[in-house]
Amino acid sequence: MSIETGVARPPQANVTDPFRVMVVDDSAVVRGIVTKMLEEDKAIQVVSSVGNGQMALNALERYDVEVIVLDIEMPVMDGLTALPLLLKKDPDIQVIMASTLTHKNAEVTLKAMESGAADYVPKPTSSKDLGAGQFKSELIEKVKVWGQARRRKPKRAAPPGGFPERAKVPAGPVAARPSVPLYSGAVTLRPAGTDSIDLIAIGSSTGGPQALFAVLGALKGAPIRQPILITQHMPATFTTILAEHITRLSGWNAAEGKDGEVIQGGRVYIAPGDFHMVVEVQGTNKVIRLNKNPPENFCRPAVDPMFRSIAQAYGKRVLAVVLTGMGQDGMKGGQILVQGGATMIAQDEATSVVWGMPGAVATAGICSAVLPLPEVAPYILKVSQRR
């Protein structure tokens, strides 16, 4: 039988409050493993652990929660049903969907992200794999990222009658703030190219799906003749669903790139999960090549190999865009692109979930503009119309 737990620790002086997390999963075993795993990091405190969406709603009345790790398939109330109700109760709460790597769950996860979920993490099918490896490191990192994002938001004015009263959990010990690379150096812009462009290339990671939906949705119906190549850090299956959602939301013809496929204007090509997507010249054609070369920046697909190949295939007739994401993937490949005369822009820090990737290219001095997310699509449209 599922139980709910509230965890309290005695406060300690001179520490930063840990991020307050709720774990929602119908399996008591999974909840136990995930809770133990998260709390091994002193910057995280699991304040509630519950077995379904209805229990999560009830728990929000009593616990002050910043991040929810939400399973999809649960009895009584599943994750997709619970999501809008949780966000209605607390619009600032950050919800990370945890789902196994199936086509159905990938579809539900992307739908959840359209409906307000902050992020997702692929969950191993075996409970013995939950507490180790990539799942552990990715979930811990994302809890920290989205906890920070929650704390950066302006405090909302309370509605009439106030917010529901919640239990305050004493702070526990915490190490330094999450080790998410932020770039605070001065940004030096370079002049944009003036040539017409033949290709638009986009790289993104954490927060990227929502950013891509926003940018490509804003370009719906725009007279853009160029192809768009996208590398989004995502596993296999999820990139298939991402392409389908982009097509539905934006009207663009979006699909995963296929090895040997000739690149055509007016289409969106997405790097498939677990493959680097690069461009090769064959006669008068540019074709997509997929490979399983070693990960770069701990990622496959990675942005750098795509950018490097584009620099060789298209020269200066490229607009490269780097959106929100952790790390610095895209910087080295971006330097090669810009050295060849291409134009690069980045999402700004204020609208990025993590100003890692865009911050890296911005502070490297290779960008012609650093823009809030709503201004990215108009910039792309303007550059695409050069003649």
Image (tube, grey):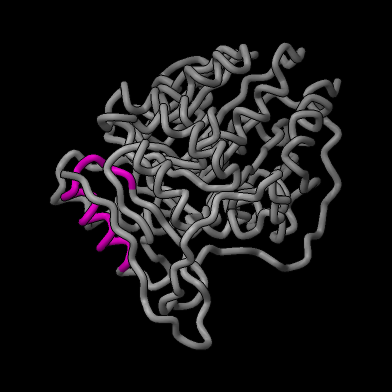
Which residue is depicted at the point 27% across and 32% down? 74
Which residue is depicted at the point 30% across and 47% down? 50
Left or right: 320 in relation to 76 = right
Magenta highlight range: 24-39
Is residue 316 positioned above or below 14 on the image? above
Is residue 257 positioned above or below 369 on the image? above
Q: Quadrant of residue 39?
A: bottom left
Can you say which quadrant of the picture contains the N terminus?
A: top left
Main SS, magenta residues: helix
Residue 339: in sight, yes or no?
Answer: no
Residue 201: in sight, yes or no?
Answer: yes
Q: Position of residue 115 (x, y in %)?
A: 53, 29
Q: Quadrant of residue 181?
A: bottom right
Q: Nearer the viewer, residue 4 or 357?
A: 4
Q: Nearer the viewer, residue 354 or 174?
A: 174
In this view, the residue farthest toward the bottom is 13
Which residue is depicted at the point 62% across and 33% down? 201
Q: Position of residue 252 (x, y in %)?
A: 61, 14
Which residue is depicted at the point 41% across and 27% down? 81
Can you say which quadrant of the picture contains the C terminus?
A: top right
